[in-house]
Image (spheres, rainbow, N blue to C red):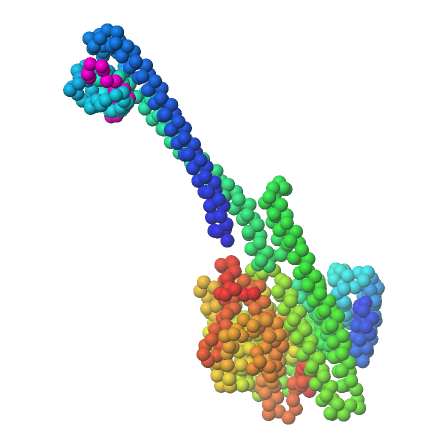
Amino acid sequence: MRVLLIEDDPHTAAFIGKGLREDGHTVEHAGDGKQGLFLATTESFDAIVLDRMLPALDGLVLLQTLRGAGNRTPLLLLTALGEVDHRVEGLRAGADDYLVKPFAYSELSARLDSIVRREREQAQREPTRLSVGDLELDLLGRDARRAGKRIELQPREFRLLEYLMRQAGRVVTRTMLLEAVWDYHFDPQTNVIDVHISRLRQKIDHGFERPLLHTVRGAGYRLGE
Amino acid sequence: MTGPLRSTSTRLALAVMGAFLLAFVLLGAGVYVAVSTLLLQDARELVRTDSAGLMQLQRDGGRAALVQELRDRLDAPDDPDAVYALIGADGRVEVGDIPALHAGRGVRWTTFELAGDAMPGDGTQSPRVLAQLQPLPNGGTLLTGLRLQSQDRFLALMLRTALVALAVAATLGALAGWLTSRWVSHRLGHLDRTAARVGGGELGLRVPLDGSGDAFDRLGRRFNAMLDRIEELLGGVRHATDHIAHDLRTPLTRLRNRLEDLRHRSGATPAERAALDGAVQETDHLLTTFGALLRLARIEAQPPAGEGPELDLSALAADAAELYTPIGAERSVRLAPSLEPALVRGDRDQLFQMLVNLLDNALKYAPEGSEVGLSLHAGEAAVLRVDDGGPGIPEADRERVFDRFQRLESHRGTPGSGLGLSLVRAIVHRHGGRIELIDRAPGLRVQVTLPLAGAPGRIAPAEPLE
């Protein structure tokens, strides 16, 4: 995957660049807004990681210019300001997701994968069935089965499983789950998500030889074989 | 707030009016006394002259001439107010039409009322007569008098005029006082309302100035300068927290990433990995605490949430209950929600955070196998109650638990940052509500009261907070 990284802070840029390369991506780095806009409009990328605060050209202005020109490249906005209005502002300007600095690399990696995948899925038809291994989810009939055996799920568990299956094979962080499945931006006091995941795991993995729902240490969860 | 304010200026206006009226009454009384004394002196002078004339006649022409003169004067009076009489030595009235009088010895003055001699104009009052009694050398007494009716009429007119003037002055005074007090409270009202709203968090607000440069205008300008300074200082605090966020959270995250890097390196023994896992967890905990502290500072600096969108608190509460039911189930604590719809205005994420923190606390301290109640009622206001059967909070500590990093001694061992309830209180205050801790014996009830969307305004704190 070819990723454009627009970030002025050399330390952060080096840290993100190193992680992305280790994950097997090609990284182009732009140190300011002007250079970033030039690269983004003249070359083709699979994803852009954009810092909000940039010298020469503000990140938000860059984003609006890019979207105004019809460029739909999946874009992850990095911001040092963690307030709701900044998030809304960024998303409204056309960012696909946002990430508050400072962050763990695993969070950035998971979110980047998620927006690229979403972009690809949107290009195709909206699926009505999802499947991972022998686990199947019928989105229209709200029905979950593993190896043909029906699994009883609460509505929230269904949404949780649906989200995990849409992101199958990729790491999903706890914050991503809270935002996507519960639709609230808040700071969970204890690891509430872990409890919900372990209940879901009971339902889909209990009694099967190969577990599908994995815990990724220090990062989050991954659904896959 | 306008009650005592208005009454202060009203009291002032009343005091000024009272002093003014008192001065008016004193002055009026003085003038009245002086004028009536003067009039009486004039009358005496007239009577004395008249009497002296008659005595001269008596000395020149004898008693018969005097009697003749008196009869003439009574039949065809020159002065209609003059009164004459001749009283015999036995006290009988020989000439004239007056009631019997006891004539003593020597010259003396007397006043009496002449009955039946109605005053023209208003006939009810019999006019007073001022008379001089002059003993005659051969017995008997000459009475020379003057009806005081014109003097009395003058004084009565003066009194009536003074009373009318007093009434007019009182009315005008009351009107002027009322207008003054209205004007003062109107001018002070701007200050008062602005102060109240700024106190509520609308720090950008300023007192409107009229540029007249009067005392109120100057006060308003001072007030605005003070608010500018407060805003500047608050901005400084916000800046400082932002800097802390940037300057400390970033190196902490780097530290965390390096630790994780180390853990992923091949060659680490399982024991080393476990140690590194612990270190990563510690860093995560620090970062979380830091995030909570920053969030708290930001919420406290935000303006009131009364203008926010309308939302159903019961839907949020139901979501929070659903999120926490499995957590309770792990320790066999049952969560029992009983929710009525209640529309409030505000920030959805913050209100959810409030609910989550309250439930988290309740579930943390509830004993195994007990029940945690979550109820929401909508009456005058939205009342949210979270009840647990835990150890409760000693009375002395109830206010303290809301302070940053304040954790009760008995809870030191349990996980938590000590910011959960501070955050809850900041959110409740920002939404114009109040929070109370109530003893359930055993257990604790946390009661949050928020204004309903239809009824704007703040819920006054049950007890002074800070």
Q: Is residue B150 left or right of residue B437?
A: left
The furthest residue to the front: B137
Q: Which residues are magenta?
A: B122-140
Residue A19, compared with residue B95, is above or below; it is below
Image x and y of residue B87, in percent? 19, 17
- Residue at image coords 57%, 80%: B409
Image x and y of residue B335, in percent? 50, 79
Residue A158 shows up from this direction: no
- Residue at image coords 26%, 7%: B60
Q: Residue B301's quadrant in the figure?
A: bottom right
- Residue at image coords 47%, 40%: B16
- Residue at image coords 51%, 77%: B394
Image x and y of residue B344, in percent? 52, 63
Q: Residue A82's quadrant in the figure?
A: bottom right
Q: Is residue B101 left or right of residue A23?
A: left
Residue B64, compared with residue B184, is above or below; it is above
Residue B396 shows up from this direction: yes
Q: Is residue B298 left or right of residue B193?
A: right
Image x and y of residue B46, in percent? 33, 16
The furthest residue to the top: B61
A192 or A115, nearer to the observer:
A192
Q: Is residue A106 magenta?
A: no
How many numbered circles does the render carry? 0
Q: Is residue B137 magenta?
A: yes
B31 or B262, nearer to the observer:
B31
B436 or B135, nearer to the observer:
B135
Quarter of the image for the C terminus of chain B: give it.
bottom right
